[in-house]
Image: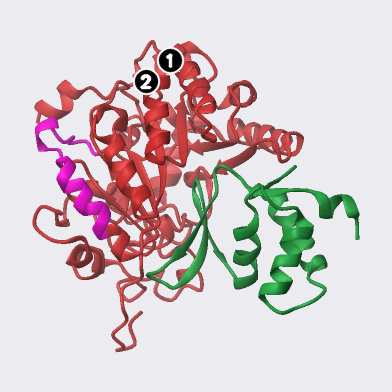
Amino acid sequence: MGGGLVTAAPQPFGLLAELTHQCPLHCVYCSNPLQLSDRGDELSTGDWLRVIGEAAGLGVVQVHFSGGEPLVRADLETLVAECHRLGLYTNLITSGLGLTARRADALVSAGLNSAQLSIQGEAAGSTDLVAASKRFDKKEDAARVIRESGLPLNMNVVLHRLNLSRLDAIIDVCVAWGAERVELANAQYYGWALRNRDALMPTADQLDEAVEVYRRRKAELGQQVELLWILPDYYEPYPKPCMGGWARTALTVAPDGVVYPCPVAAEITTMEFASVRDHDLAWIWAESPAFEAFRGTDWMPDPCRSCPRKETDFGGCRCQAFALTGDAGRTDPVCVHSPDHHLVTDALARANQRDDVVQPALVYRRPTATVRGL
Amino acid sequence: MDDNELMATPRLATKAMLKHDSVRDVELLLLPERVVLLNKSGAAILGLCDGSRTVREVVDQLEAEFDATDLAGDVMTFLRDASGRGWVVVS
């Protein structure tokens, strides 16, 4: 962009519809904002139907229903059906808690295309430790329900210091439950995960071993199960091209109707994001100041501005820049060229120097502490 | 050309969905976390993979539609690749 030309905004392919912040889990790396939306602030069914229609008009072709736990919303089937009517691909991102065979069949009848089930580890203790939930058994039930409903089963597990060494067993569980695709997502440090960063950050040795396991299992499984490795960006020399560039390919609508270029952008408290309650989605996407703020490369400071990688990683993640430096316009500190890179290497040094005799305490996400306690 | 391959019946994988994107005027293949931009021939081939036709019948129909001959090789190469990527299931 830039060069004096008026360039039309890109067209988004994906909508992440965060229907609710209500969730039966209390994950120590929850990616929802520190300040959760109250149930009473949630968009109505009618609001969501309008948002879905406007998204389709903008070029969105995939809708990912997420939360919180989207199954909490009784109108999920109605929203899926509207997507289906508009020819949009739908994906349910779920903890699995609350997914009965009856609910799954209703969602499939409404046109649901795909489901992604999260696990926290390979056994009940992992869900208790990470998510403060005893209901690992419900996840195994949900996997079966998804398969029996005819949907492809995708699984996701967030990897960190406390479960990386169990990767082989975690993959075993995903295979045994019939997953077609497994996202091995190394923890990203925003919001709640940033608060628990010292407890979650793996050592370099742990990661090296896990990468070996991933490579071996990927080769063994071949086409049977697609394994994806989401990089632990703190250990990378260059930042991730977050969201493929700010406000470029996807958008997120939060439970209260506020629209973000990325699921964790609510944390950038210095920016004002517009709501679908006040504006239509087309204006928010194409013209709202927050969406325009970091489009293209003109906004970049050095070292990004003069960097040959600027169209590759787009300066990295704006949310990470803000979370670590307080300025969303700085180079992502993950980058070796960032003047703030020590913020990342210091965290890694702590992770690699400490022994695990004394574990940092885990802080669980609890609605009482976050919805009301502000 | 392998006759067995021509007699196989390809169908789009359950997780996959073909879509004409009227906003961009392109043909897309939609997958759980992926959007694939198809060229015209790819879209035409996948559009016929509904489990009711053999590869031979897909080839015949495309040759008639595009007024072309000798498409079998190209169609089979595409379908082998599509099957390897999990877009198409061949039975």
Q: Is residue A290 above or below residue A216?
A: below
According to the image, label 2 marks what residue?
A: A97
Q: Is residue B51 above or below residue B57?
A: above
Chain ID, red in image: A
| Residue B19 location (% of width, % of height) | 48, 60
Pointers 2 and 1 within a single chain:
yes
Looking at the figure, which quarter contains the C terminus of chain A? top left
B29, A168: nearer the viewer: B29
Q: Which of the two residues, A33 or A359, is positioned nearer the viewer here?
A: A33
Residue A280 sits in quarter: bottom left
Chain in green (letter): B
Residue A45 is covered by the magenta coloring: yes
Q: CA distance from mark 2 to mark 1?
A: 6 Å
Vertical arrangement, residue A211 with respect to residue A3, above or below: above
Q: Give the residues drawn in magenta, as a range.
A: A33-54
The subunit letter for the residue under badge 1 reads A
**Residue shown at the point (34%, 49%) measured from the top left:** A83
Q: The numbered mark 2 sits on a residue in which chain?
A: A
Taking the spot 66% from the left edge, 32% from the top edge, the residue there is A209
